[in-house]
Image (cartoon, rainbow, N blue to C red):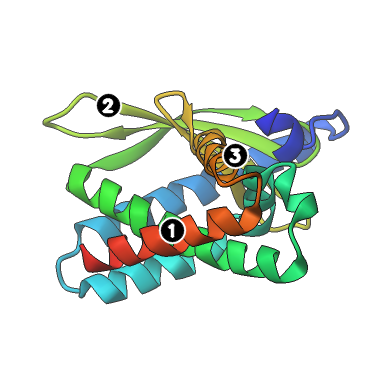
Amino acid sequence: AVLAFALGLSAGYGPAAAEELDEGAAEFVQSLSNRTLEMLRTSEISEDERLERFHALLREAFDISAIGAFVLGRYWRTATQDQRAEYLRLFEDYIVRSYSARLGSVYSGEGFEINRVLPQGDDGVLVRGRITSEKNPPIRVDWYVRRPQGVYKVVDVRVEGVSMVRTQRDEFTSVIQRKGGEVEGLLEVLREKIKQLESE
């Protein structure tokens, strides 16, 4: 379901175009991974600056609108324009704060290496790699990337087989259901979670 939505599975590219897409996606993921790990390693910037850099990197490299709409699922259709706008803003802030905290507590001097690149339709590529460390076992990370308008964007990341997009969708759906099926209930929870993360 994630791939069908985010990558638009189909056939169409010839061998030369597919090879170019695969190579470009691999370079994009390698650069993105290196930049992320370097951002986590550096101790020369404040936490506020680190968060700002994560925000900039997320906007640059991830298809936030597509990911956010998929995560909200069927409730995206029932949300008002104002709710959608606030939700995407809160979603980005929540992802940046929660994942930077989680990653920062786990990764320090690691590197990232690509193992395999697999085409996923006209503009989609699965880049399989792993985070390596001298002290810990390697961690498998799969990046789902697409290039719908000539610009590479990440649409999902799976760590050891666990999808970021699917996990967030299940979590947010559960919250909305507990809040009577109202998107506003999720917005309230996201506002509160962000406040908690800000105070940590």
Q: Looking at the image, which is closer to me, 6 or 73?
A: 73
Q: CA distance from mark 2 to mark 1?
A: 27 Å
**Res 138 label:** 2
Percent position (x, y) of residue 133?
19, 34
Which residue is denoted by mark 1 in the rendering? 94
Left or right placement of residue 2 versus residue 138 in this view? right
Q: Secondary structure at mark 2?
A: loop
Q: Few, some or many C-alpha atoms within 10 Å of disc 2 (few <14, some 14-19, many ≥20)? A: some
Q: Which residue is found at the position 40% from the left and 49% from the top?
A: 33
Q: Amino acid at mark 3?
A: Gln
| Residue 145 rendering spot, x and y as whole percentages | 62, 43
Badge 1 amino acid: Tyr
**Between marks 3 and 2 in the image, the one whose residue lies nearer the viewer:** 3
Q: Secondary structure at mark 3?
A: helix
SS at badge 1: helix
| CA separation in Å, label 1 and label 3 | 20 Å
> Residue drawn at (60%, 63%), measured in percent from left and top?
88
Tell me which label, 1 or 3, sits earlier in the chain: 1
Circle 1/circle 3 CB separation < 8 Å:
no
On residue 177, the disc is 3
Residue 2 visible in the displayed image: yes
Q: Earlier in the sequence, mark 2 or mark 1?
A: 1
